[in-house]
Amino acid sequence: SDQAIGTAHGKIILIGEHSVVYNEPAIALPFPAANVEVRIKAIEGESKIFSSYYNGPLASTPVSLYNLRRTIETICEDLNVDTSGMLITVSSLIPPERGMGSSAAVATALIHALYNFFECSLDNETLLYYIGISEKIAHGNPSGLDARITSGTKPVYFIKSKSPETFDLQVTGYLIAADTGLKGQTREAVQDVAKLLRKSKRKTKLLISSLGSLTAQAKSAIEEDDIAALGRILSKAHRHLSDLSVSNEKLDHLVQTALEQGALGAKLTGSGRGGCMIALAKTFDQAKHIANELMKNGAVETWIHSLGVNTHE
Ligand code: PMV
């Protein structure tokens, strides 16, 4: 067709980051409050790409967009269509390198847009295959969690060696996410946990397995629609993550602020040392108040996400 659109959303790790590397479970949620749209319009001649990083011919994209270019080329080759004749516009509201799955979400939206543009039907397996190609170029060794979450609509209970299990999250309450404005430091943080494990084996092992049991408890709290219990579990997880050395001053300050302003619980989310933090609130008004206070205390952006059974969306 002349014009096509593809969309996708971000992800938030509710609990289980870092310990998931050591085969403990993690829970991740689709985060529609931050989303991506890719539009494709038919044009004459060479394809062009428009994004916040780069506007110009597809053939000379910078390194930061190379994964997208390769994805486009691979799909066109597989569908047996020409790579020229497209104006591709990427509009993303997901900040990059914050642990929100921005790269996987952009890939997901792009793949949908291409399949719509060429009027081909796309099954989930094929979608995951192409996101995988894009993510491998962007990140080297992706766990696949971002691909699952940004392309799916359900929360996932994830254990590395097993196939991810989706479940329903229907909790009365709201999740606030706040961006520190600092890039997350995934590689360094993961390496430092590994170092800590060598240095203080017993203590670190205990922290990791406690994070695993907190994740299991979080799933029960969700199943029982007990947001107060879920909040306490998240706050405990933050203290463990901090003991694992993956928090920083700004994350600790925002977590503290959220708790002082009435959050039911708060923690860093994702790799830590930057990136984002999350907090829980019972009502939308409380969530709005907490989000405002987080902005006053150094957050550069906040999102409010309804967790399910709420009257105010
Ligand atoms: O910040 P993100 O979304 O890249 O999450 C990192 C999660 C870790 O558990 C720290 C690392 C991993 O590979 O699972």
Image: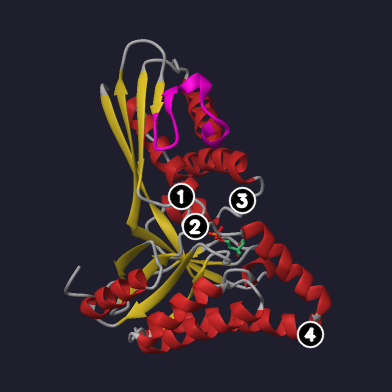
Ligand 1 positioned in quadrant = bottom right
Query: Which mark, residue 67?
Result: none
Instruction: Tell me residue 151's x, y (percent).
Output: 42, 50
Residue under the image location 57 percent in, 33 percent down: 63
For the residues marked 3 and 2, what is the alpha-carbon distance in whole angstroms? 15 Å
Mark nearer the N terminus (1 vs 3): 1
Do residues under tags 1 and 3 come within 8 Å of each other at their CB atoms?
no
Mark 3: give few (<14), some (14-19) or many (20+) Cα within 10 Å.
some
Give the amino acid type for the residue marked by disc 1 in the picture. Answer: Ser
Q: Is mark 3 within 8 Å of ligand 1?
A: yes
Mark nearer the N terminus (3 vs 4): 3
Q: Circle 2 — which element?
A: loop
Could you tell me if residue 219 is visible in this image?
no
Mark 4: give few (<14), some (14-19) or many (20+) Cα within 10 Å.
few
Label total for image: 4
Give the amino acid type for the residue marked by disc 4 in the picture. Answer: Arg
Q: Which residue is mark 2?
A: 98
Q: Quadrant of residue 115?
A: top left
In this rendered view, identify the residue nearer to me: 113 or 162.
Answer: 113
Q: Which residue is mark 4?
A: 202
For the residues marked 2 and 1, what is the alpha-carbon distance in whole angstroms? 8 Å
Q: Is residue 231 left or right of residue 145?
A: left
Residue under the image location 42 percent in, 84 percent down: 231
